[in-house]
Image: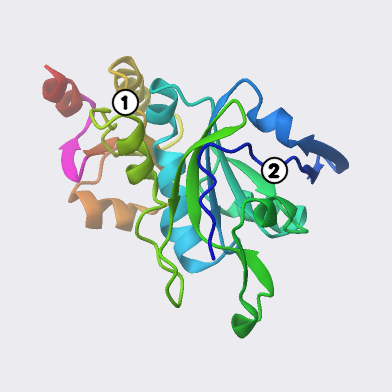
């Protein structure tokens, strides 16, 4: 049976991490003591749902969580530190702390260690999320105990809605730019001034002129997109905000 640990202390575990080519240790108190932490756990690094949705959305909403009293967002998986480090480099995860529970001690202590031998995974974590305050679990969202890998309640939006149903979520923003473009710098500065986080797509690195024309219908940069709407260049952005 999957255990709900609300009202209980998190397990006291020492995690083995590899940082800057050195072994370091981080214990449960380092992560949870005196802090408000959102933790989510998943079956494995590089797996489809974990990589496409679960981790990226928590990363995307990190600033909103912080504005609503969360000190740190932690992702735990029963993987070794080398796998978790490689996954961090591959993913949008700069705002999330990835913790390797290589021996499954923390996951077992949470009552979430399950056998996925049928997939060749061995012992892994069931998918869940929880809000932890000063080491005590306040709320857990545990996926239903059904076959497969359900993903219905442990997502970032469900957790944010529990913390603050009225939380203002930032709109998704992308800016297509090229190096040395003064108008691009102007647009990015304006977005920052207005409190917008944005993803920058740089021509020659992340995209080509063909992509620029195909997506925006224009050949000049910057091209700004906010919440699925094409705003245009720096002057268009200024007009949008005015």
Whether residue 177 is visible, yes or no, is no
Vertical position of residue 99 compared to residue 132: above or below: below
Mark 1 neighbour class, 10 Å CA radius: few under 14, some 14 to 19, many 20 or more: some
Q: Do the residues labelled 2 and 1 touch (CB within 8 Å)?
A: no
At mark 1, the secondary structure is loop
Residue 228 in magenta stretch: yes
| Residue drawn at (57%, 64%) of the image | 43
* Labels 2 and 1: the sequence-earlier one: 2
Residue 170 in magenta stretch: no
> Which of 91/25 is in front?
25
Identify the coloring: rainbow
Region rendered in magenta: 227-234
> Which of 115/239 is in front?
115
Mark 1 sits on what residue? 196
Which numbered marker is on residue 11? Answer: 2
Vertical position of residue 81 compared to residue 179: above or below: below
Give the image location of residue 228, x and y in percent.
19, 46
Whether residue 131 is visible, yes or no, is yes
């Amino acid at each position: 049976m999957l255990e709900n640990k609300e009202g209980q202390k998190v397990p006291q575990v020492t995690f083995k991490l590899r940082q800057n080519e050195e072994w370091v240790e981080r214990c449960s108190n380092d992560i949870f003591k005196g802090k408000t932490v959102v933790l989510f756990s998943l079956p494995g690094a590089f797996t489809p749902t974990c990589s496409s949705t679960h981790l990226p959305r928590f990363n995307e909403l990190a600033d909103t969580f912080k504005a609503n009293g969360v000190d740190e967002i932690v992702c735990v998986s029963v993987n070794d530190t080398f796998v978790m480090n490689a996954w961090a480099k591959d993913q949008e995860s700069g705002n999330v702390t990835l913790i390797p529970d290589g021996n499954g001690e923390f996951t077992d202590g949470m009552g979430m260690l399950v056998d996925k031998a049928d997939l060749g995974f061995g012992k892994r974590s069931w998918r869940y999320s929880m809000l932890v305050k000063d080491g005590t679990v306040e709320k857990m969202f545990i996926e239903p105990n059904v076959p497969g890998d359900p993903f219905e309640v442990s997502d970032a939006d469900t957790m944010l809605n529990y913390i603050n149903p009225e939380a203002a979520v930032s709109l998704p923003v992308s800016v297509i730019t090229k190096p040395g473009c003064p108008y691009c710098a102007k647009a990015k500065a304006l977005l920052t001034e207005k409190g917008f986080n944005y993803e920058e797509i740089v021509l020659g690195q992340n995209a080509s002129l063909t992509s620029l024309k195909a997506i925006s219908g224009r050949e000049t940069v910057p091209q700004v997109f906010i919440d699925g709407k094409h705003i245009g260049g720096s002057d268009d952005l200024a007009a949008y905000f005015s």
